[in-house]
Amino acid sequence: MRSKRPAIKDNPREVALFQRRAITGFAIIVLLLGVLGGRFFYLQVVRHEEFVTRADQNRIKLRPIAPARGLIFDRNGVLLADNTAAFRLEVIPERVKNLDATLEALGEVVPLTPEDIKRFKDHRRGRRGFQSLPLRFRLSDDEVARFAVNRWRFPGVEVVPYLTRTYPRGAEFGHLVGYVARIDEDDLARLDARADGADLQARYAGTTHMGRTGIERYYEDLLHGEPGYEKVETNADGRALRVLDRVPPKPGKNLYLSIDVRLQEAAEAVFEGKPGSAVAIDPRNGEVLAMVSVPSYDPNLFVNGISHTDYRLLTSSPLRPLLHRALVGTYKPGSTVKPFMGVAGLELGIRSPQDTVYSTGEFHIPGQQRGYRDWRKGGHGHVDLVESLAQSVNTYFYSLALDMGIDRLSAYLGRFGFGKPSGIDLIGEGSGILPSREWKRAMFDKPWFPGETVIAGIGQGFWVVTPVQLANATAILAARGARHPIHLLRATQDGFNAPIVMAPLPPPEPSFIVNMTHWDAVRDGMVAVVSGPTGTAKRVFADAPYSAAGKTGTAQRFSRTGDEVDTRGLDEAQRHQALFVAFAPVEEPQIALALVLEFGASGSADAAPPARQILDAWLNPPPERSDDRTAGQSTGRPGAPACTPAAPGPAPAAGPDAGRHDWPGHALQRR
């Protein structure tokens, strides 16, 4: 078999093929290099600024700085809410080898409660290991010293200084000023629910606390301030290396309230721990001078988280210290509505000041056998408006209410603010109940009966008022029917070196009393209550160095048709509620007051004496405490001069009243 002849190589052809392939490969390489170079040019030149910014975002973090919260003062510059320096214990988890063992050993040096440890572990979830987390707030000096000695034993644990909210007056202003507490999920949801929720989330970046109750909550926007930030360079793990830039935060505004600490102290003292409330208002401008709810609570307990034990003690107390009685406490007004009924009867033309009613001790609706009793057996005889107020004669007002009818009664007394919130600058105010045909139909789907009108005339039945409402109505009466919106905020200040700016006053509503002789008649009746020969409170005000007008009230817990009951021998829970309303001086009222005692036999015996003490504290203060209230004043409201607030402490000289005596509602003429 013949072998196959090997093919002869065509060298020129192979060389040409190689050259074509080399050129093609080189062209592809050049093309790819061109594409890569173009991409580099696009990324590094065309989009240079974008990628530099993104790189900086990976390298530079913005760390928020919480603003200092604004301070709260009374009208004289007495500090009510402060930011004080304190120390807290913080832990960086990644630097602790055995966290549980460290916490156990740390508890032997600085006491830790199970709540502290639980709160710390809950806070740790979702946080990076190198982030410092608070373990225990408000360390004492002794605890700081003991930790400093043992610090070498606890790597990753530090004592850190910070500012914390404190309330120097404690329980005295617990309900009024309120408190701040740690921001939780409910607070964040509340911020999101607002129209500008996104901005608010940024505004609260870095903030751990916000107002929960009282002034702290209502004026949260003014007190909070604006956060600052730091530009911090970080490594790939997000750990801070250095601070590149810092924009300081803007602190919140300082607030000056219309409250007077001395009057507040005097009002709280008269209760002697018995549950009740008192509210004092300047009828010339609507400023709230005192607002007391007894018993109260210490707001400092809530700032950094109240313990279960303390909270259980507050919530389980039968006296309900957490209840803000002045704002949401509900009471039957009793005979304190009689002056308002008197104005309504005169203005509606149902009675004249000279008309008399004969009191036999029991009133009957025509055609009915049921009797509605007076407080005195045998009655009071013939009485006109002045005597009916002085002796608190029920028959006069039974008859007046029946003649007036529930529709006109509820319509006219609504002008005094009954049955609706007063509009005071606090959240959660109660509206009370002003009896009416429509209200009963809406609540019970039942018709209105004449007997319900009769007892409404003396503040019983469906009537419900709050102390703020009752004080507001008394202030309107003292101002001859003119309504000045009541308020607590008096002035604001942007920092200690800024001028104090007086808060603008809303214009008063004109008086709805057409004939001022009608007002004079009611005033005379209220004056007779405290200074007339038959007045129910004449003994209490017998030696008062000022003229006053008042009205006692007793909210009965027993039927007025039954036998008389001596409530002084009964358990407190079974006693009546004692009330007193007043304004003084009569010639130019400067204070209107409503006081409620939850347990008392009568308004004249139990409520009038403490009310007198409160009026004395404002109108007739001891010489060593009278300060600028002894000067004369005008009724205008000029702007306040620039001044700086007083340092924390009792000295009142540098508040918004400093150097001026023409502010209505503060500087009072002593009598």
Image (spheres, grey):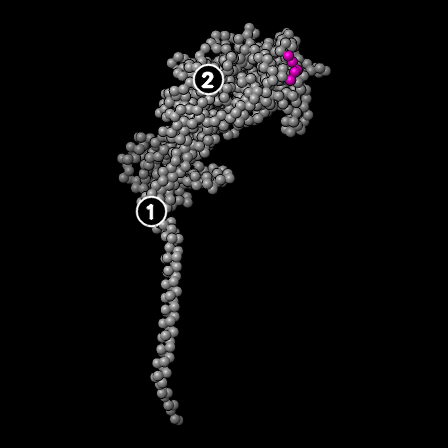
Left or right of 3 on screen, residue 544: right
- Residue drawn at x 37%, y 66% as measured from the top left: 33
Left or right of 12 on screen, residue 599: right
Kindly identify the amino acid type of the residue bearing the numbered disc 2: Ser
Dot 1: element: strand
- Quadrant placement of the C terminus: top left
- Quadrant placement of the N terminus: bottom left
Q: Residue 520, percent across and down?
A: 57, 12
Q: Residue 26, percent across and down?
A: 36, 72
Badge 1 is on which residue? Answer: 233
Q: Is residue 554 above or below residue 179?
A: above
- Residue drawn at x 36%, y 85% as measured from the top left: 10
Mark 2 crowdedness (10 Å alpha carbons): few <14, some 14-19, many ≥20: few
Q: Which residues are magenta?
A: 348-352
Mark 2–mark 1 Cα distance, whole angstroms, equals: 60 Å
Of badges 2 and 1, the one in the foreground is 2
Badge 2 is on which residue? Answer: 634
Q: Main secondary structure of the magenta part?
A: loop
Q: Is residue 124 above or below residue 50?
A: above
Left or right of 462 on screen, residue 179: left
Q: Residue 507, percent across and down?
A: 52, 25
